[in-house]
Amino acid sequence: MSTLSIFIDESGDIGEYQAHSPYYIMTLVFHDQNDSIDNHLKHLNNELANLGYGDMAVHTEPLIRREEAYCNLRPNERRSILTKLYFFALRAPIQYKTIIVEKKECRDVFDIEAKLARELAAFIRSNLTTFQSFDNIILYYDNGQRIINRIINTVFATELSDYTVRKVMPKDYRLFQVADLICTIELTKQKLAHGGLSKSEQYIFHSKKAFYKDFVRRLEKKQL
């Protein structure tokens, strides 16, 4: 029996356009459970344990901003944590899809939701044969924002005949943390298209050139 796991996360403020929050991003990470990630998980968890973070979720944006559990860590320590998760994403047999909404192009919150739903539906239809090849499809989401819950239930119910939704705790699933990481990388790419890195981002990514070399080019090969 074949099962497709889909881990879903979002980044951005769902409110109307503001200069400090110009985008809303949703990322879906796909994993065919017949392709084991056990060895990759073991390697990642051992590496994070060596850094003192074996049992913790890697939450990318607080890590970059030196917030929450990362407030006392030096930049090189925070970059090391992020890099371990990034290389896990590269090695694991996964793919991903990111949908990006530029909020200034939307009239209101309902327009943002409609655009996300349309793009997700179009993506599913264009890959329908692949989705239908699985016996089971399981969607993992942390119920962080109601808009994503509505989109998941509306679009998947319309486009697919059968699926299951499971609420997750981020600390329990490294692939959910990968979805969070990809959201942050995609958001940073959008920001760099119109400006530069913030001071906090410079501590982690160093420069635009280094960001694309170290965190973008290889990851993009996994994008659907």
Image (spheres, rainbow, N blue to C red):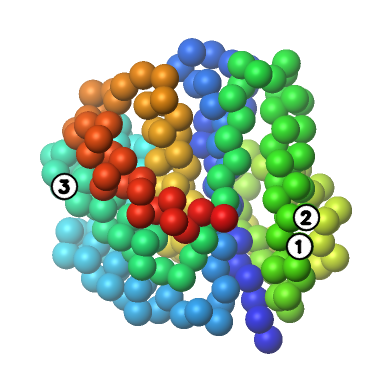
Type of the residue with mark 2: Arg
Q: Would residue 146 be found to the left or right of residue 222 on screen?
A: right
The residue singled out by tag 3 in the image is: 77
Type of the residue with mark 3: Glu
Real-space Cα distance between discs 3 and 2? 42 Å
Type of the residue with mark 1: Leu
Q: Would residue 203 be found to the left or right of residue 186 on screen?
A: left
Q: Is residue 220 above or below residue 137?
A: above
Image-quadrant location for residue 160: bottom right
The crowding category of the residue bearing disc 3, from other C-alpha atoms within 10 Å (few below 14, some 14 to 19, many at least 20), is some
Residue found farthest to the bottom? 1
Real-space Cα distance between discs 1 and 3? 42 Å
Label 2 sits on a secondary structure element that is helix
Q: Report the mark closest to the observer, 1 or 3.
A: 1
Label 1 sits on a secondary structure element that is helix
Mark 2 and mark 1 residues within 8 Å of each other at the beta carbon: yes
Real-space Cα distance between discs 2 and 1? 5 Å
The residue singled out by tag 2 in the image is: 125
Mark 1 and mark 3 residues within 8 Å of each other at the beta carbon: no
Percent across and percent down for residue 111 are 75, 25
The crowding category of the residue bearing disc 2, from other C-alpha atoms within 10 Å (few below 14, some 14 to 19, many at least 20), is some
Q: Residue at x 31, y 47 (%)?
A: 215
Q: Is residue 169 above or below residue 115?
A: below
Q: Quick one: quadrant of the N terminus?
A: bottom right
